Image (tube, rainbow, N blue to C red):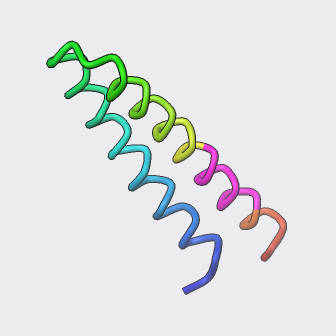
Amino acid sequence: MKTRIKDKAEGTFHEMKGRLKETVGKLNNNEKLKAEGTIEKVAGKAQKKIGQAKKVLGK
């Protein structure tokens, strides 16, 4: 599998996982879990962008 496709897929996975953690944290009033979810969501978005940049650069 090409790295750009892998980066985009893993980024999407981490973004969804982060959103889930955020939601569970909000429902349970768990600020730590909510913050972890936010961080993971942002990291997932960044990883997706890296995959998109690799596509543009042809890597």
Give, as a single range, the part of the protein colored magenta.
Answer: 46-53
Lateral position of residue 8 relative to residue 46, left or right? left
Q: Main structural element of the magenta stretch: helix, strand or loop?
A: helix
| Whole-percent x, y for residue 44 in the image | 52, 47
| Whole-percent x, y for residue 28 in the image | 15, 18
Residue sitting nearer the eye, 54 or 23: 23
Q: Is residue 58 above or below residue 35?
A: below
Name the quadrant of the C terminus: bottom right
Q: Is residue 55 above or below residue 18?
A: below
The residue most toward the bottom is 1
Q: Is residue 55 above or below residue 46?
A: below
| Whole-percent x, y for residue 21 in the image | 29, 35
Name the quadrant of the N terminus: bottom right
Lateral position of residue 21 relative to residue 35, left or right? left
For the point 80% across and 74% down, the residue is: 58
For the point 26% across and 19% down, the residue is: 30
The residue most toward the right is 57
Q: Is residue 11 above or below residue 21?
A: below
| Whole-percent x, y for residue 42 in the image | 55, 36
Lateral position of residue 40 relative to residue 19, left or right? right
Residue 8 lies in the magenta-colored region = no
Place residue 54 in its image quadrant: bottom right
The residue most toward the top is 29
Q: How many marks?
A: 0
For the point 58% across and 53% down, the residue is: 48
For the point 46% across and 64% down, the residue is: 9
